[in-house]
Image: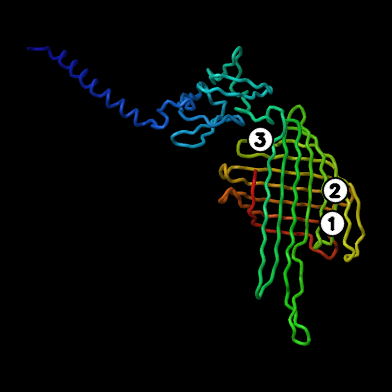
Amino acid sequence: MWIPGPIRNMFGALAIFCAQVPMATSFAAAAVDPMLTKDDRSVATVELTDGSIIVGRVIDIVEDNLHLDTAFSDDLAIDLALVKNFRWFEQTALLLDDERVVDLDMLQVIDGELLLDDDRVSVETIDTMNPADWEKGDGYQWTGDMSAAAALTRGNTQTDELDVALNTVLTSTRDRYTINTRLEQDNTYTPVVSDDGETTRDKVATADNWKVLGKYDYFLDNPRNYLGVNASIEADALAGIDQRTYAGPYAGRRLLEWPTLSLDGELGLALVNTDYDTSVNQADTDYTGLNWNITGSSSVLGPDAKLYLRHVGILDLQETDQLILKTTLGLTFPLLLGLEGAAELTYDYDGTAAADRDEIDQTYRFRIGYAW
């Protein structure tokens, strides 16, 4: 049967198209993570403001970010400001910026707006997904870490080393309690030969200090601003300080609140009292000083590693050479069995140390501990 050429060409093209459809479908199916094609209610499709489509399991919504487990990242953080459309078929509770807690049968965002039962709000008003009791204003979140390092050397060289630290923080939506403690005692046993040839060892302290610091913060209407009071007691035998105490009020602000970086700054006054060891023959001092604190932490190296900074400064308002600076920079990282390691550098400058003692004390530490 004769068929005109144009009609034959049309049927040929149609046959080729039909043959390509199953092949294209198979390629499209292969391009999707098979784990995400299952009937899983935790899988969501997110459309971004630039038209991109991302499919993944919902992990969390916190700190203005939607966290997804995708085929290419086990924790992809998406800025809520970039989310245009989003649908998630899971019951969830959301804490909003206005401190409301809403329970939704399905989480749905259309054109950047979160659909509530009888309202629409910007998706950026989501503060936290499935908030804990303390985040809703009931109770406190308790976090902290404790660590220790000990070494005992016997032989030609004899040393004893002990380093213990405990830090804990109780945080609510209204206030915060902080306690930092540290104890360090290191000794070296130096051989001494007597006139009759008998060898004994003299105990020489290479570190002998301890410190306890307590702080209380009260958050204002803007929770980035707060008022607080701190008090500290410490001793440092090698600096000739039998006991030093200081206490005073301050005003603070959360300077940075980024997903991977937080930084607090505080400025206030402190009454400082220093009692010197009787062996250094130096008069005790009392003065009012300017006191500042800087505290920060970062997860830029990964969610399991934390960089941290603690800095304290005190300046005598009448004698500016009476300056105290205590700075600690450290890194914690996970070990086996739930333990964590900590590598730490401490740099202390004490302009109030006894006249015959060093003003600078620099220490490197490695500790093993536990965090909660």
> Seen in the image, is 124 located left or right of residue 229?
left
Q: Position of residue 154 (x, y in %)?
A: 66, 71
Q: Earlier in the sequence, mark 3 or mark 2?
A: 2
Q: Position of residue 159 (x, y in %)?
A: 69, 68
> Seen in the image, is 26 located left or right of residue 161?
left
Q: Position of residue 355 (x, y in %)?
A: 85, 63
Image height of 311 relative to 177, above or below: below
Q: Earlier in the sequence, mark 2 or mark 1?
A: 2
Where is mark 2, residue-wise? 246
Q: Residues within 10 Å of mark 3 (few under 14, many from 20)?
A: few
Q: Say whether marks 3 and 2 touch (CB < 8 Å).
A: no
Give amino acid for label 1. Answer: Thr
Give amino acid for label 3. Answer: Glu
Where is mark 3, residue-wise? 257
Q: Earlier in the sequence, mark 1 or mark 3?
A: 3
Give amino acid for label 2. Answer: Tyr
Residue at 80% x, 52% y: name it: 324
CA gap, disc 1 and disc 3: 35 Å
Front in this rendered view, residue 127 or 4: 127
Quadrant occupied by the N terminus: top left
Q: Residues within 10 Å of mark 2 (few under 14, many from 20)?
A: many
> Seen in the image, is 106 located left or right of residue 156?
left
Q: What residue occupies the far front of the structure in this picture?
A: 337
For residue 187, what is the image quadrant?
Answer: bottom right
Where is mark 1, residue-wise? 352
Q: Position of residue 334 (x, y in %)?
A: 58, 48
**Colour setup of the view:** rainbow
Numbered disc in front, either 3 or 2: 2
CA gap, disc 2 and disc 1: 13 Å
